[in-house]
Amino acid sequence: MYVINKYSICVNIFNGLINLKIKYFLIIYGSQTGQSEVIAKQIGDRFIECGFKPRIYCMSQSEKSFYIEKEKFIVAVISSTGDGDPPEKSARFIRRISRKNLPEKWLCNLNYALLGLGDSNYSSFQFIPKKLDKILKNHGAKNIIEIGLADDQIGLELTVEPWIEKLLSKLNSKENIIIDKMTEVILNDNLIENITIKRGSEKLRNEKDLRVPQPAIEYLTSSISHIQITDFSSIPWQNDSRFPGQGSSFYEVDVVGVILLNGNDLNGVKEKREIHLEIKTGLNELLKYEPGDSFYFITPNDKNDVDKLLSQLNLLTVADQQLNLYIQPGTKKVNPTIPEYLPNNSSLRYIFTYCLDIRRTPGRPILRILADDCSDENEKRRLLELCSVQGMSEFNSLIRNTGVTLTDVLSAFPSCEPNVDRLLELLPRLIPRPYTVSCHHSIWKNRLRFVYSLMEFSAENGRQEVRTGLATGFIKSLNVGDKLMISLKETSKFRLPPISVDNETDGYDIPLLMICIGTGIAPFISFLQKIQTLKLKKDDKNCCNVPRYLFYGCRNLKKEFLYENEINIFEQLGVLTKLFTCESRSESNINSSIKYVQDLLKHNKKIVIDFLKISNSKIYICGDGIGMSKDVYQCFLEIIKGAYDVDNNEGITILNELKKNERYIEDVWS
């Protein structure tokens, strides 16, 4: 480990700018899903290539491997979770530097650069990075470049890579010419030309000075033996390596029911299905779940996708032979290790089926190494264009937004024959998919019920074939009698009761305002089943004294009103005070002004206002709609401003206080 006196720092002040020449410094990250960690390590590799010697630590290592008050310069990478909390392993670090009893200007000797990762689908977008930025400044720390706010909805790399270049420019005492050019290139998008994955715009084709990322440092090598590996049962899934968010061990369950709830139609209604599972082992762990909790499903890659990739790599003939992985002798990568989720003594077929995500759209680092493996110069040039700074806009519109896969890219560039070791290094880990349970064990005992929408993608925009979503397609393929591996997901705020008060209440006395669209109804069915059981147990004749409202929206109520009969029974029993519904694509009432849940909330704002005045009331929001979180947040903001006669900033303060006190809780995805 580098010690403090090894810092070599020269500070010059010129025209109000601080230029730092730093060789040794600290990179820290706070990650919930592993994304911040990956990017922090990429930043580390990039700086090492440029002669710097950074140390890289998770924020959880504060006061163990580093003390922020003793540092002179840090780079921080942190994400913001959907409910506005810091990533779990960074929470202690955030609490520590937020303490009010710290000395004034505690970090006045610290310079920093901060990169935030988030998803603008959520109303809490970039809440934690902005909070960390404010905390550091309040302690006297100085940011040497503006905070980077990367958005996963449009592509993290569109912010991350220019931000890294800007930071490098600043540390090398250069001005920000590069970043200005980047911004200009990104904004200039030719919408008139017929631009495809194989052919770029004329401007990009004529660009003589493409700025492309450096290829990632090679560090893995492999060998194949004559031993055949055809039975995967003895290979521990992903080497028994736990992943962020895993809340229990994995257990095998039986499929005991598969139900088609509704088909799809031309008006956008998606096929909805149910799957029922029976737990026989792991009862003590798995049946700890509470309403709102989710389970991870181990979802392998599709066999046809795996075979196609192996064929494109010319590896089908050796796909089932024993594969051994090693660190490449002489690699320049600092502290290289074999990814812990890649088992030795397995096979290429196993790794591409169970360990690596071959469906995820390849990022620019992968396109960069694919370019080097093209024998056709035109194909190489086009891949370099797509991963270049100048080609960011085309990468975003043709690769990222269309959801093309690695096999699609290899089909479009047939001369590309990538080295499989490079793919093992760069392809992301295949993470199980979480699904929220739509029942409660007080009624369903050792059985679980899940509802899902079947995702389907047509063969267009670079996609070579019709596909279903990886997880939903796999679940649909399961039949009664099949087996599935599941684990609990770590508990979040979105449960009944919230984990912060589960020692004080069973959730029965909590007033509920539940807002959902589509399959977002699942956790609320679990909520209501638990309340129904508690009502019977308590023999409560006054259940209706606790208000519980459900606002439910979908495209077409006649075709996809999920759990309609159950909800009506809950209302009849007094478990649910009142149900409110809306539909965005009604066939019978096309002129209705109430199409979305936010319209429904505004139409019933008196109920909402009265509900907010109840001190222990909680608002839960769940759904699979792009922008739902922001739209509902804005709706509540307008209702609060009108009800309390406050301005926009005061309204935001009230809403943020509701979030802080776990009275406004979201689980929204896209």
Image (tube, rainbow, N blue to C red):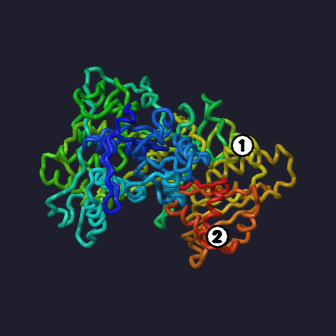
- Helix, strand or loop at mark 2: helix
Examine the image and state in which quarter residue 43 appears. top left
Discs 1, 2 touching: Cβ within 8 Å: no
Task: Give the residue displayed 28% in from the left and 47% down from the top.
Answer: 365
Question: Residue 185 at what x, y percent from top left?
Answer: 26, 65
Of 458 and 247, the residue lying toward us = 247
Q: Earlier in the sequence, mark 1 or mark 2?
A: 1
Number of residue marks: 2
Can residue 482 be seen here?
A: no
Which amino acid, by three-letter code, is at mark 2? Leu
Question: Residue 302 at what x, y percent from top left?
Answer: 38, 42
Task: Give the residue displayed 52% in from the left and 56% down from the top.
Answer: 127
Can residue 568 be seen here?
A: yes
Label 1 neighbourhood size at 10 Å, few (<14), some (14-19), many (20+)?
few
Q: Compared to 56, does 468 lie above or below?
A: below
Q: Compared to 284, does 162 lie above or below?
A: below
Q: Nearer the viewer, mark 1 or mark 2?
A: 1
User: Is 143 on the left-hand or right-hand side of 135?
Assistant: left
Using the image, tell me which numbered label, if any, was put on residue 345: none
Which amino acid, by three-letter code, is at mark 1? Asp
Question: Residue 320 at what x, y percent from top left?
Answer: 30, 28
**Alpha carbon separation for disc pair 1 and 2:** 31 Å
Question: Residue 70 at what x, y percent from top left?
Answer: 45, 40
Q: Quadrant of the N terminus?
A: top left
Residue wearing tag 2: 600
Of 597 and 48, the residue lying toward us = 48
Residue wearing tag 1: 502
- Helix, strand or loop at mark 1: loop
